[in-house]
Amino acid sequence: MSENSVKKSLFIKNESLCLILVGIAGLLFAAVSAAGLLITETVYPADELLISFLPNDYINLFFGIPVLVLSAVMARKGSKKGLAAFAGSQMFMLYNEIAYVYAVHGPISTALGVAGLLFCAAALIVLLLSADKAAMKPSAGIRRPGVYAVILIVMGLVFVGRAAANLLGTAELSIAEAGVNIADIALCLIWIASGFSMLKKNGVNSAYSLISLMHGSLLFIALILFLFLQPLIAGTQFAAADIAAIGGMSLVFLIPCFMLTRKFSAK
C-alpha cells in the first residue's frame, strides 16, 4: 500500500459501518452524561451516585467526546497514531459505560447506558477485526518491545488483581466502586493480552499495544481531572496526596505511550 493510499482512509475495510457505530455510541455516551447534568436528581437519586458519577459526566462531555472526535478526524486523514487514539477512546467509552450500567439504574439511564455499551463494543470489534494490518504497522522500528509488553502486563495484572480482591473481599463496596472494579477487570485484561502480543515483535501487535497504552493514558488523565473536579462539584475534600500519587503513577503509561506513538508517526 502506498503512502498516498494510506492517507485516504481510516485503514479499515468496513470504515462506514465503524463510523456509524461509533457515531451512535458517541451520541449515546454524550446523552448519558448530559442527562446526568440536566436531570441530576432523577439520574442520581443517591449521594453516593452523584459524588461518583456527576464529575465524570463533565469529563466525558468535555474530554472524552472531544478526544474521540479529534482522533476520528486524524484517522480519516491517514494518521496511524490517530487510529490508535480512536480505538483507545472507544475503550475509554466502553470502560465508563460498563461502570455506569452496573451502578446507575432507572429506565432512561439503563436504556441509554446499555445501548451505548453495545454500540461501543460493536464499533470496537468492527474496527479491530477489519483494520488493514499492513497499514497499522509502525513507521519505524521499535527498540526494546519487551519493555512496553512488561508495562502492560504488570499494570494489567495489578489492576485486575486489585479489582478482583475488592470484589471478592470482605470489605463492603459501594455500587459505584463495584462498577468501576468490574470495568477494571474487563478492560485491563485487554492490556494484558496486548502486552503478551507485543512479545511477538510484530508490527500489528505493536499497534494493539499502543491502543492499550492510549486507553490507560486517557483513564489516568480522566482520573486526575476527576480528583480536581469532585471537590468543586460534589463538595468532597480535596485530595492533594491522591492527585500526586495518581499523577506519578500516570507517568508509567504516559511516557511509554508518547515514546511508542512517535514510532507510528508518518515519515
Image (tube, helix red, strand yellow):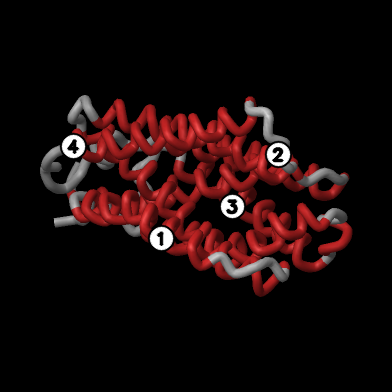
Going by the numbered disc 2, the residue's amino acid type is Leu
- CA separation in Å, label 3 and label 4: 34 Å
Which quarter of the image is occupied by the C terminus? bottom left
Badge 2 is on which residue? 173
* Foreground label between 1 and 4: 1
Going by the numbered disc 4, the residue's amino acid type is Pro
Label 1 element class: helix
- CA separation in Å, label 2 and label 1: 25 Å
Going by the numbered disc 1, the residue's amino acid type is Gly
Q: Earlier in the sequence, mark 2 or mark 4?
A: 4
Does residue 40 lie above or below 22 as drawn?
Answer: below
Label 3 element class: helix
- CA separation in Å, label 2 and label 4: 38 Å
Verify CB contact (< 8 Å) between mark 2 and mark 1: no
Q: Which mark is residue 23?
A: 3
Which quarter of the image is occupied by the N terminus? top left
* Residue in the picture at 57% in, 48% down: 93
Q: Earlier in the sequence, mark 1 or mark 4?
A: 4
Q: Earlier in the sequence, mark 3 or mark 2?
A: 3
* Residue in the picture at 66% in, 43% down: 177
Where does the image place residue 169, in percent across and percent down from the top left?
63, 28
* Foreground label between 1 and 3: 1
